[in-house]
Image (cartoon, grey):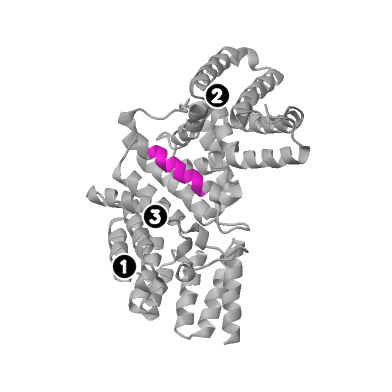
Amino acid sequence: MDQPTPPTDVRTRIDAIYRAEGRRVFASLVRLVRDFDLAEEALHEAFAAAVEKWGADGMPDNPRAWLVSTGRFKVIDALRRRGHLTALHPELTQRAAEVAAANAVRASEDIEDDRLRLVFACCHPALDRSVQVPLTLREVCGLTTEEIAAAFLTAPATMAQRLVRGKAKIRDAGIPITVPEADQLADRLGAMLAVVYLVFNEGYAATSGAALTRPDLSGEAVRLGRLVTELLPDPEAVGLLALMLLQESRRPARATPEGDVVLLADQDRSLWNAALIAEGLELVGRALNSGRAGPYTLQAAIAAAHARARTPEATDWNHITRLYDALRAAHPSPVVELNRAVAVAMRDGPAAGLALIDAILAQGALGTYHLAHAARADLLRRLGDRVAARAAYERALALVRQEPERRFLMSRLAQLERF
């Protein structure tokens, strides 16, 4: 143990550990007790105990292991209070012994892998696909039900019911909290990659809140992506990791020190992380050379085209548009169509892009997607149609839920008023 630490420092450090390690501790407790609600209760009681204990005795050498151990005893206390301990005691004791034995050999590694095990449990084929991703975002990444509901464009009450069903299914069906055997990994890979990518997206561009990004989530997605490629170096897994690294490389340049949005064309490219770009380019090359370029690899190739451009003017929009053509042909979606329209606008001019976006909106697929209206507003602004641009910006403002994007849209509206 460290020497006793001043109370305010302890609380600050515990808050930081909760943000960084809370869901990992939770994953270990779920593996131990196989009950999401019980694990969540034990997690919070363990952190409450840490506030009291660490202030008096100092920080433990391994806070995460301490929290898992304390959480385990909190579970036993909870079961005793509920009168369930007698029935569950032999099984729980066996699980606790398994975890303790494993941790004694490879404490940090095994606890680290618990989060990956929990992701695979949440992506189990017995669960409906509409449950897999939300459940992972809630239980593994700690997003609130409201945040997940917003990401899936559904009501919080509906999402809450979906999450409850998912947790009950894992418990009642006895779905194991394990990494699948090698011969099962390929069948589970698609859902796993989808989850990792959604986690990254929420970290790279938060759907709501005061900050543009959530580095904890994108960092966790990258870590999970590395673990998946180690388990199964499938080209799409490699492509997804490349995509995340290349996008993450731009994080330092995407916002001002005050947290305001900086568009790609206005970013200081000297701030881009050269090491992440180098690793991402090497990986996307490997994925493309496999001859099986899926949606993540194609998106990584698009990110690579941006990463190679030393200036905005050097961006090869013709190449990027061709990549979007391939992505649209193989994996069509309204968002892919929207991104392609923006690329076409950069290659052929704003009128060409605007026609495509108007066609997409006329189909009704992205009517509540604020970025579609923001992109349309920008093209109208570039074409000099101030009245229509103002209306489109106002529509985007009515839909946006993130403060930096809201400030950006308001600044665009103010610019229209000045000219």
Comparing labels 3 and 2, the label whose residue is closer to the camera:
3
At horizontal 57% and vertical 12% (from top left) the residue drawn is: 90
Using residue 348 as the reference point, say whether residue 400 is left or right of it: right
Q: What amino acid is at disc 2?
A: Leu
The dot on residue 32 is: 2
Rendered location of residue 182, percent (x, y)? 32, 29
Rendered location of residue 314, percent (x, y)? 35, 71
Disc on the earlier residue, 3 or 2: 2
Q: Give the residue pinned by disc 3.
A: 277
**Residue 387 falls in image quadrant:** bottom right
Q: Is residue 273 visible?
A: yes
Quadrant of the image containing the C terminus? bottom right
Look at the image and give the residue range highlighted in magenta.
218-228
Asked if the magenta segment contains residue 28, the reply would be no
Q: CA distance from mark 3 to mark 2?
A: 39 Å
Q: Residue furthest front?
A: 3
Q: What amino acid is at disc 1?
A: Thr
Disc on the earlier residue, 1 or 3: 3
Instruction: Indicate the secondary structure of the residue bearing disc 3.
Output: helix
At horizontal 44% and vertical 28% (from top left) the residue drawn is: 178
Q: What amino acid is at disc 3?
A: Ile
Asked if the magenta segment contains residue 227, the reply would be yes
**Residue 96 falls in image quadrant:** top right
At horizontal 62% and vertical 57% (from top left) the residue drawn is: 209
Using residue 361 as the reference point, say whether residue 27 is left or right of it: right
Q: CA distance from mark 2 to mark 1?
A: 49 Å
Comparing labels 1 and 3, the label whose residue is closer to the camera:
3
Q: Give the residue pinned by disc 1.
A: 321
Badge 3: few (under 14), some or many (20 or more) residues near its Cα, within 10 Å?
many
